[in-house]
Image: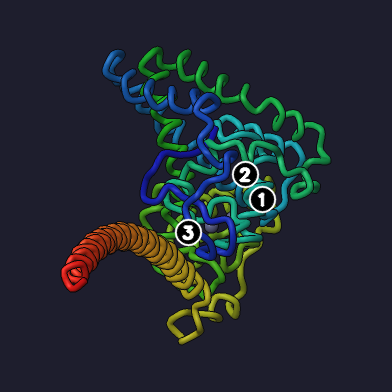
Amino acid sequence: MHDTPPDTTGTVEHHSPGARAPYERAPDEKVNWRSSIPFLLVHVLAVAGPFVFGVSWKAVVVFLVMVWGREWFITAGYHRYFAHRSYKTNRAFQLLLAVGGASCAQKGPLWWAGHHRDHHRYSDTEADIHSPLRGFWWSHVGWILCDKYNEVPHERIKDFAKYPELRFVDKWNGLFPWLAGIAAYLYAGWSGLFFGFFLGTVVLWHNTFFVNSLAHVMGRRRYVTEDTSRNSWFIAVTTLGEGWHNNHHYYQASARNGFFWWELDVTYYVLKVLSWFGVVRDLKVPTAEILAANRVKDGNFDIGTFKAHWAHASAAVARSHASLGARVAESKAHAVEALAERRETLHERREALEHAIEARKQALDEFVQGSMASAEDLARVTRRGNRELGLLDQ
Ligand SMILES: [Zn+2]
Ligand SMILES: [Zn+2]
């Protein structure tokens, strides 16, 4: 699955954000429409299906399970366990987390968690796989619909890639959404399949993608981090607690993203309950000192916001620089053209002048020649007259 038509931006900066003409995409950063067909088709089925097959109560149950039941495996499993190792568990439950996550049609746990580690490693730099500084659409689905990140980044996820059962789930991840779809159909029929499974999958996808896109654009920043992450209660509600994204970027090792009691974090509540039964253990949470430090409101320099503004400003400067260059080149071309025209006119005028001079010279020559002829005639006449006078004298 992967990238992008023009949208808010439609663009990618390849160097430090803004350093070069922004918004050009490398070939492997463009939407691969062919491989994106299943992704697009699920959207069509999700929207059209319920009109054809209706919406039963059982289908509503399937929908809720498909969105928030499965989402827990993304947030608690793919994200907080595989990507961030924020708690420990046994090998069987680890496998269950992998299978539950794979049923969400977001590829395998090794692929997902490996790339997510890169997001934290390079947040909002050119190496960030889905920074919204490259455009909202890019951070939302563009990076998934292109070919650039198809491969599993094995070197980033060696700690889990050593388990053969996880490698199996990762390799055959496409199987698990099918099982979820079949289960939806068996339980609630066609309505369960289209409204429950397909629409549930679409909502689940965009819920997850909003954490990469919206949670870096919408909401407030409590902690100073080097990225653009924000805390949004809205995204926290829809994603079982992942909306406290600024908290998360600040202290990514935490199993709890809602740092305070009023910050709803269903993912953590479920983990906490599971810890009472010994299913999971060693849930990491930030200390009171960590919670109190690096607050934006305490006047700490917010480098993340500064960097984002800087990137936007330098992109704008690069753009105006490019358009100024184009304007200079254009007026230069005009000047050269005008000069050439002027030279041509001068040349024509000079030729005309030369012709005129030549004509006058010729006329003068003719006049002189004529005068000479007349003078000679006069002399001849005079000489003859003289001779005749002489003859008379003689
Ligand atoms: Zn993030
Ligand atoms: Zn994370």
Q: CA distance from mark 3 to mark 1?
A: 23 Å
**What's the residue at 35%, 27% (across, down)?**
60
Label 2, secondary structure: give it. Answer: helix
Question: How busy is the neighbourhood of tag 3: few (under 14 within 10 Å), some, or many (20 plus)?
Answer: many
- The residue indicated by pointer 2 is 78
Question: In x, y percent, where is residue 143?
Answer: 54, 43
Image quadrant containing the C terminus: bottom left
* Left or right: 173 in relation to 328: right
Please report whichever mark, 3 or 1, sits nearer to the chain's N-terminal start. Answer: 1
The three-letter code of the residue at mark 3 reads: Leu
Some atom of ligand 2 lies within 8 Å of the CB belonging to the residue at label 1: yes
Which residue does the image show at 40% across and 25% down from the upper left?
196
Residue 102 figure quarter: top right
Residue 69 visible? The answer is yes
CA distance for labels 2 and 1: 6 Å
Between disc 2 and disc 3, the foreground one is: 3
Mark 1 burial class by Cα count in 10 Å: few <14, some 14-19, many 20+: many
Q: Residue at x 64, y 36 (%)?
A: 150
Report the quarter where the N terminus lies: top right
- Say what secondary structure mark 1 lies in: helix
How far apart marks 2 and 3 lie (CA) works out to: 25 Å
Q: Residue at x 69, y 47 (%)?
A: 114
Residue picked out by circle 3: 133
Residue 386 on image: x %, y %: 20, 70
Numbered disc 3: secondary structure = helix
- CB-based contact (under 8 Å), mark 2 and mark 1: yes
Q: Which residue is mark 1?
A: 83
Q: Decide which of 386, 11 is in the foreground and name it.
A: 386
Where, by quadrant of the figure, is residue 344 drawn?
bottom left
**In the rendered structure, which disc, 2 or 3, sits on the residue that comes first in sequence?**
2
Q: Would residue 261 be visible to someone looking at this image?
A: no
